[in-house]
Structure formats: structure tokens, C-alpha cells
Amino acid sequence: MKIIIPDLLKKNVINSFPDGNIWIENLGNLFEYCLKKYSAESYTFYPGLSFNFVSKIYIKGIPYVLKLSPSSEELKNETEAIKFMSDETAKIYDYEYSKGILLEECFEPGEKLDILNNNAKETEIAFKILKKINLKCDSENFKDIIYFKKYIYLAEKEFSNDRYFRKEYFEIAKKCFCTYEKNTQKYFLHGDFHHYNIVYDKIKGWKVIDPKGYVGEKEFDVAAYLRNNTVDTEKNTEERIKIFSLNNFYNAEKIINWGITQNIISAYWSYEDSGQIDYKTFSVIDILYGILKRRNKNERF
């Protein structure tokens, strides 16, 4: 069966997985296998695919989300994360790890959080959801965020002479991981918590999709929210931090530090993929660093 595969998905899969070429070549046959397996009547493809092939298929008139992944390991990790998150995410109906197949609940109409176009309202919704899923967790089913530490040192080695990569940024990131390693309490993390992974269902309300599933410091998830759907203004960034740090469930300074850390890692990954530095990430780092300096001078938001 011939299907249109987005160029970005092709590029990412081929560059990221040893057998990526083979998976891309067989994707049409795999999709056809799924249509027959589930007796699907019709289907549509989701736009903006980057690492997984995702479609909406209809079975007896009911929509489901079909995800095809080039990594059975990552798909297994996602299903474990979905099970842990329980009612805050989609139900799993079927999976076949050996083939990289996951069939799950489809939220309708599935509008993304950014549709509200209101920073405060979006952040309040995100805060309520994240607080429910950031539970204490020492499960070995999920990878520890210490895995990302190596990218700080790789970025420092690669970008030490670049004027945008200030020494202070790397010191903050290294200290962030060092402090975390001394902290024995770990929490379950969505791992990719942002506006486009928070969707609306007409019956269940706002829910979360596509968890990666990690354990670590809970502010790590908040930092991902700051890093995505970037507003590029101090006012909106401060508003997000203020809402998440209400009642001290999340620590504002840790949110900022992890935000700086994640942007360094993101910049390095972008460089690794394209050979070019994505300087857009530094507008976010500069904003966060400015906020951090004011906090250190005991200035209020």
C-alpha cells in the first residue's frame, strides 16, 4: 500500500534508527496490515509527524488513534507511561511491540491547548493536569533524566567558543544535574509536556497525550512547558512560572534552572541533526537567565 510519508518523518527516522530506511520502506505494508487487523472502515493521517506515523482510523464508526513507531522499546515505554497516568491520558486498546503498533483512545475534537490564545488560562489548565501526574515514582520501568546530563558536556565542548553559549549557562545546567543527583526523591514525568500534547475532549475535558515516561525532578516537566509554544516575552514566561509555583508544589528557581538546561540540550540536538546552531533557543535562555538574576536580587515577579 502506498502512503504519503512526510519528509521530516523520513529524515528523523533514517537519521535516528539503524534500520530506519527499512522501516520507512515497509511502512505502507505495516499500515495496510493494521487496517486489516482492526477491520478499519476509513482513516485520516495526522499532520506534523516527526518520529512516529500517526493516523485516525474508524472501527464501526468509532475513531481510534493508530500509532506506528520505528522503536518497539520507546513504544513499550510509552504504554507503561500511559498506564501510570491512568485517567489523565488516553486508554490503550491494543499493542504489538514487535511490529511497533499502538492502538489507543481518540480524543474528539482533539483541539490543542494553544487554541485558547490566553497564556494564563492555558497555564492554569496545564498546572492542574501536571500536578496530577507528577507523582512519586521509583519505578525501573522509566528512564532517569540523568540520561540527559551527557548532552550538557557535549554542548559545552562543541560550543565553548560561541558567544551565545555563555559560561554561566553551562554552570547552571551542570549544577542542576549535580543537585538532582543528591536528591533521592523521584517523580514520574511525562517527559514532553507542552501545549500540543494537551488536547480537548468534549466529554472528558483536557487530557494529555504522547508521554515519553521518565523519572526525575518534577520541575523538569514544567521546564518543557516553558520551552514549547514559546511566547518570547518575559511577562508571559514569568506568568507561567508564577502559576506553576503557586502553593510551592513546584519550585520557581528549579523551573528556571531546568528551563535553561533543557534549552542547551535542545540547541545541541538541533546542531547534531542539522550541523547548524539554532539561535532561537537563546531568546528563551536569555529571558530565563534574566528572571533568575532578578530573583537572586530578591526582586519579586
Image: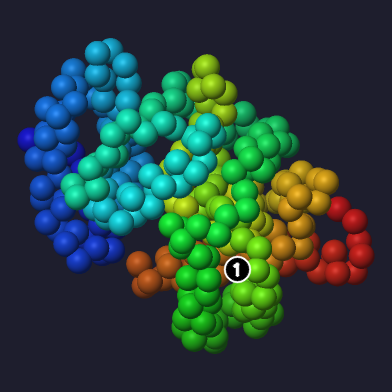
* Residue 76 on image: x %, y %: 33, 50
Q: Is residue 243 visible?
A: yes
Q: Is residue 284 visible?
A: no
Q: Secondary structure at mark 1?
A: helix
**Residue positioned 49% across, 27% down in the render:** 111
Q: Which residue is mark 1?
A: 261
Q: Amino acid at mark 1?
A: Thr
**Residue positioned 16% across, 53% down in the render:** 23
**Residue positioned 19% across, 26% down in the render:** 38
* Residue 150 on image: x %, y %: 48, 78
**Residue positioned 38% across, 71% down in the render:** 272
Q: Is residue 71 left or right of residue 108?
A: left
Q: Is residue 88 left or right of residue 235?
A: left
Q: Which residue is at the far top?
A: 61
* Residue 145 on image: x %, y %: 52, 65
* Residue 178 on image: x %, y %: 64, 78
Occupied quadrant, residue 294: bottom right
Nearest the viewer among 190 and 280 is 190
Occupied quadrant, residue 210: top left
